[in-house]
Image: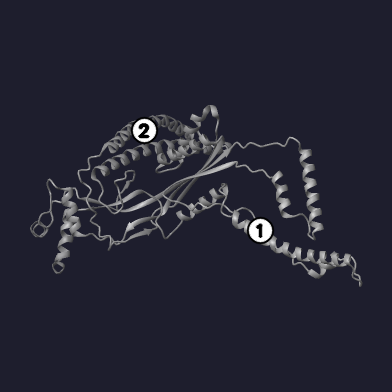
Amino acid sequence: MPGTIPYNHPSLVLGHVANTRVMQKLQQMAHLQNVTDAAQEKLNALVQMKRSMTMTMNELKGMGVDIKELENKLKEIDANIPSAANEYMTVYLQNETALAALKNELANDTDDRNEIPESPIDFESSTLKPQPLSTGSLKLDSQYFSMDSNFQGDVMANIETFIRDTAGEGGSQVAKAVSAQVANQNRNHHLCGTLIIVANCTHRNVGVFSPLVIDPDKAIRAWNQMHEKNGRIESPEHEFRSKGGSGDGDGMTLITGATYASSFVGMVHVLQASTEQTDNFDKLKEQLERKLRIGGWLSNASGGIGVDPTMLEEVKGFLSTQSVSTHISVVTMGVVPSIKSSTLSMGVKKLAEVDSDKLKQVLNSSESDTSTTASESEEACDRHRILYAQNMRMGNMISTMADIDRKDNKVLDINSLMAALDNYIDYVNSEQELKGAPVHFYTRTLTRSEILRLWYEKYHPKNEE
């Protein structure tokens, strides 16, 4: 089985030769972390055992069963818990100090000495395939942080801690980005608080080179670059025939696969919105009624129905108020979801067909065989009303559709955030694509003898040994 190493250094690239020094330090870090995890699991197991034993003893005691021996066993567990806790704290402090030192060494290690050569993998012949070899998981959490002006520093610290603890791999980088977003919103607006939704996923698909084809010539160049002082391969044919590729040494490690994970952080910033009150509502009401009466009279005198739309827009201007109460922000790592503005809840109701005959019958209260100037004028107005009603019907439909088209995809709100979260989950569940940030790498060690054998098989295919 291929070994895996934790990914937290940018020099580790899928399909390339791993930096030996970086790998050694990361493996040391992984070992220290495993020791700490083992000590913590031991303590958790004892605590869980005590809880389970206590529940069992209470149940047996209620049934009248003698539990003296169980009580003695429970005392032994009680005696082991403090020692396990002390052991865990001791190991934790020691390993955290060692981890901090290794991280500092990684950060200050700038002497590459041209150690990372060109990858010996033949990328044209090799294929990186998604394979469902890992375990998909989702960890979702949310928390609301109230923005108190007197304790903003504490709130920002709590937000960073929350993100770092829940965002999984890369939590520190995500926490810094989220903290910067919240600080920027609070600087430009008066925040009441921020709702933070965190989703952390491990992806089922891993990326593995299958088939993995090594180019012998590139492998020899990479080996010689990594062993410039000693151990170079000067004459591969002579060395293979004479020694059979002995003296492998440490080998050359290739990164041949990766497991992926991702994180999603959505923020809803609740703003303090100011409201304006009307000082004299009765006076405003009187003005609106007067405008509506005048608009209705003008429309009726000209053969129209109702109030002219321009007059209605003017009336709406008195009443309409607009305020933004929330802002949203999104920070992701590993997967970039589609950010689409949500569609306003609007729709076109199906309008009933206007029956011209019925409408004319309703409008004409009486019929007369004689025609006068007044009757013909009234008849013209009635016909105009029929035509006006038809035009209004079509105009309403067209204007409503235009209004929807104008307002569609222009609103970013919490619905947009939920749509982005849904899109993020869809990306994670994709079976055909590799998505996410690499969190562990699969490695393969290419030895000196294997490089010599590959070279010999390439140039002497009939003399394979």
Q: Residue furthest top?
A: 150
Image coordinates of residue 121 in percent, x first then y, are 25, 57
Image coordinates of residue 240 in percent, x first then y, are 11, 58
Nearer-the-camera pick, 387 or 139: 387
Q: Is residue 378 above or below residue 150?
A: below
The quarter of the picture where the N terminus appears is bottom left
Q: Residue furthest bottom?
A: 369
Residue density around tag 2, few if under 14, some if 14–19, many if 20 or more, within 10 Å: some
Q: Residue at x 62, y 58 (%)?
A: 402
In this view of the protein, can residue 49 be seen by the observer? no
Left or right: 20, with 296 as reference point: left
Name which residue type carries label 2.
Answer: Tyr
The quarter of the picture where the C terminus appears is bottom left
Element assignment for label 1: helix
Left or right: 217, with 393 as reference point: left
Q: Is residue 102 above or below residue 403?
A: above
Q: Residue at x 62, y 57 (%)?
A: 404
Residue at which label 2 appears:
92
Nearer-the-camera pick, 286 or 182: 286
Mark 1 to mark 2 CA distance (whole Å): 65 Å
Residue at which label 1 appears:
400
The label nearer to you, 1 versus 2, is 1
Count how many numbered circles sit on residues in the image.
2
Q: Is residue 239 above or below residue 377?
A: above
Q: Quadrant of residue 89?
A: top left
Name which residue type carries label 1.
Answer: Thr
Q: Quadrant of residue 58?
A: top right
